[in-house]
Image (cartoon, coloured by chain):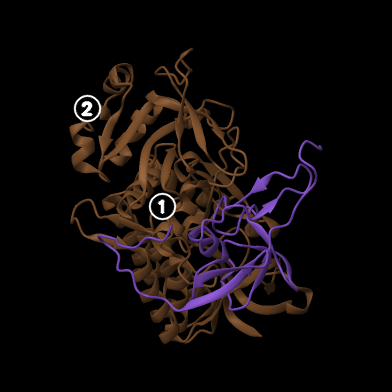
Amino acid sequence: MRVTNHPILSIEPKKEVTITVDGKTVLAQEGESVAAALLANGIRVLRYSEKKGEARGIYCGIGHCYECRIHLKEVGEIRACITPVQEGMELTVKRGGQKGES
Amino acid sequence: MKVDAAIVGGGPAGLAAAKEIASRGGTVVVIDENHRWGGKLLGQLHEEPKSGTWWKGAEIASRLVNEAKEAGAQLISKTLVWGLEKGWVVYTSDLFNRPDAQKRLEAKALLLATGAVEKPLPIPGWTLPGVMTVGAAQVLTNLYRVKPGKRVLVVGLDVLSLTIARAMKLAGVDVVGLVLPLKTAFSEAIANPQKRLQAFRTMVDLAPNPLMRMGGRFLRTDWGVNLAARFYPPWGMTVWGIPLLLKKALIEVIGDQQVEGVRIASIDPQGNVIAGSEKILSVDAVCLSGGLTPLGELAATVGCQFVRLRGLNGAVPLHGPTMETTVDNLFVAGNITGIEGAKIAIEQGRLAGLGICHKLGIGQVDQKECEQQFERIHQLRKEAEISFHPEVQQAREQLLHLWKQKRDR
């Protein structure tokens, strides 16, 4: 899902950063947000809603709506869209309530 | 920490203001939540209508950052502002709002340059991963160079959605088309093909060639709009290879764990669904454009007077010719004062910086210098090639009128 060539913008190589999501290794790039890193690896679901257990992902992309929360070890719920990736970050996609429950 | 001025928001307005104040000897701190400086400017990428050169927001942002730093401004990122006390005390915390990361900062003057936020566009299925605002798609595509999806539908026609649809196309995304949102209480103003064709007037300068061919000039008259709405082809017209399907609306987004497709339908010139016209398109992402609105929450918490003006796309803090609000030593600049382009935001930031210097007696800034900068913005607005609302000029005049009324009372 990464843009590999662009007619206007230059694509510069970035330093790789390793993070994990639900125990699986994901390769991210230095300076990008958690949300961008996960999307680049085809991961859209960042959590399941607390009550109905519905999948949730990025919405506003600027830290305002809080839809993109994901669990970061030792910190808690973070906003994936404005949190930069860091080597060794351990993320968990939290499971919410049973689907169909109100 | 004690400073002359604290600035909330490190976008074009905040950074430009910081440079003005710091270069005149004032102590200034800029606070931003993001880890990258530039705010919404970071993701901007569009072709300038007249010159044909490309506006690369990230490059302009890094120039503004360097200028602010060189002038001596202190930039604090990954920090959020959660409270204000008049006088001023600014309460901050880290990105995760941890109690042990809380700090307080004292400042003589405060500038709120918090920018804008996209209005939500509730549509059945909009919480599915893969549905995002056009602004999110812009940051992902242009800043992080990650595609929002392989096949993307864009919903809503305005300057922003058109620009971002093109940016996605440039990045290699298959943009299947641009449709209108289904008419609901939330989307009333933007779900009507006739009204959208009127809005084309503000977009003709952005996409001069393709839209002129579609009759941009013709659309400057009301009768032209009525006629075009009636005869606009249901299969749409193509701009930059993107089908503009003004006679189609999004009914719902379909998917289990994430976006798998969309249900769209044909609509009449008033935006009503034509029975039996529904069909399903396969896409993996949907970008919604509900339009931008000024973000004035912090100003509201300290009792700032607000006015709501259509031409500014929402409620804004009432402010005068030096950008000072109805609260003493509280200034505003950029999109918090109304939705306009980054070029205007930069100049407004400069004006607010001058205004703060004038008020606090930093660097002998006189009234005249502020007036000249005010005039400069007025001129720039007149010459602006891209406008977010056809009535922005009048709205600015009305705002100033309301300010004078308040002052004279």
The residue that mark 1 highlights is B340
Query: What whole-number distance in Å separates the C-alpha atoms at marks 2 and 1?
Result: 25 Å
Query: Chain B rendered in what hue?
Result: brown
Q: Position of residue B243 (x, y in %)?
A: 31, 34
Q: What residue type is labelled 2?
A: Phe
Nearer the observer, A53 or B78: A53
Looking at the image, residue A59 sits to the left or right of residue B339; the answer is right
Nearer the observer, B206 or B126: B126
Subunit bearing disc 2: B
Q: Where is residue B285 in the image (x, y as percent from the top left)?
A: 48, 44
Q: Position of residue A59 (x, y in %)?
A: 57, 50
| Earlier residue among tags 2 and 1 | 2
Looking at the image, residue B231 sits to the left or right of residue A97; the answer is left
Is B99 located above or below residue B263 in the figure?
Answer: below
Q: What residue type is labelled 1?
A: Glu
Q: Where is residue B187 in the image (x, y as percent from the top left)?
A: 53, 31
Mark 2 lies on a secondary structure that is: helix
Residue A97 is marked as: none
The picture quadrant where one finds residue B110 is: bottom right
- Disc 1 crowd, CA 10 A, few/some/many (<14, 14-19, 20+): many
Mark 1 lies on a secondary structure that is: loop
Residue B218 is marked as: 2
- Asked if residue B89 shows in the view, the reply is no
Nearer the observer, B205 or B53: B53
Q: The chain shown in purple is which?
A: A
- Disc 2 crowd, CA 10 A, few/some/many (<14, 14-19, 20+): some
- For image coordinates 57% across by 42% down, the residue present is B120
- For image coordinates 35% across by 69% down, the residue present is B60
- Asked if residue B150 shows in the view, the reply is yes
Quadrant where the N terminus of chain B is found in the figure: bottom right
Subunit bearing disc 1: B
